[in-house]
Amino acid sequence: MDATAAMKPKHYVTCAACGWMHWPISRAYAEESVMRFNSFYDAAPAHVRESYVQRSDISQYEHCFRCGAPHTEMVKSKPEDCPVGCTLQPIIWELV
């Protein structure tokens, strides 16, 4: 899947535990993103790597950004779940 297609999901998902909204991506897309970022990170000079906390890992896409609930506890979002101007983090949701 190309990045453009992944950025335009048909729907969004909401954490059932805390209500935080995410954009759903497939595991394959998450794995590809991790690989691309880690290649960039590994090749970057030290002063660039300092801007990032660490290499990426697939587990970063497997839990709610806010409360840490597992990605398996996401539900399809309703329009009222998302306030205007909010930011969304990606999460693996296999029903994409």
Image (cartoon, rainbow, N blue to C red):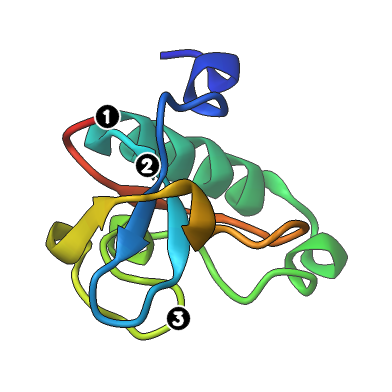
Give neighbour class at mark 3: few <14, some 14-19, many 20+ (Cα, 10 Å).
few
* Residue type at the position of mark 3: Arg
Residue drawn at the location 50% of the way across and 14% of the way down: 2
Quadrant position of the C terminus in the picture: top left
Give the x, y percent position of residue 58: 31, 55
Residue drawn at the location 18% of the way across and 33% of the way down: 95
Q: Position of 16 compared to 66: left or right?
A: left
Do the CB atoms of the residues marked 1 and 3 lie less than 8 Å apart?
A: no
Residue drawn at the location 40% of the way across and 14% of the way down: 1
Q: Earlier in the sequence, mark 1 or mark 3?
A: 3
Do the CB atoms of the residues marked 1 and 2 lie less than 8 Å apart?
A: yes
| Residue 92 drawn above or below residue 10 | below
Mark 2 sits on what residue? 24
Q: Position of 83 compared to 11: left or right?
A: right
| Residue 41 drawn above or below residue 9 | below
Give the x, y percent position of residue 21: 46, 61
Res. 65 image quadrant:
bottom left
* Residue type at the position of mark 2: Pro
Mark drawn on residue 66 = 3
| Residue 67 drawn above or below residue 83 | below
Q: Position of 75 compared to 30: left or right?
A: left
| Residue 6 drawn above or below residue 93 | above
Q: Earlier in the sequence, mark 3 or mark 2?
A: 2
Give the x, y percent position of residue 13: 35, 50
Residue drawn at the location 56% of the way across and 45% of the way down: 37
Give the x, y percent position of residue 71: 22, 61
| Outermost front residue | 80
Q: Nearer the viewer, residue 75 or 60?
A: 75
Q: CA distance from mark 3 to mark 2?
A: 15 Å
* Residue type at the position of mark 1: Val
Mark drawn on residue 96 = 1
Q: CA distance from mark 1 to mark 2?
A: 6 Å
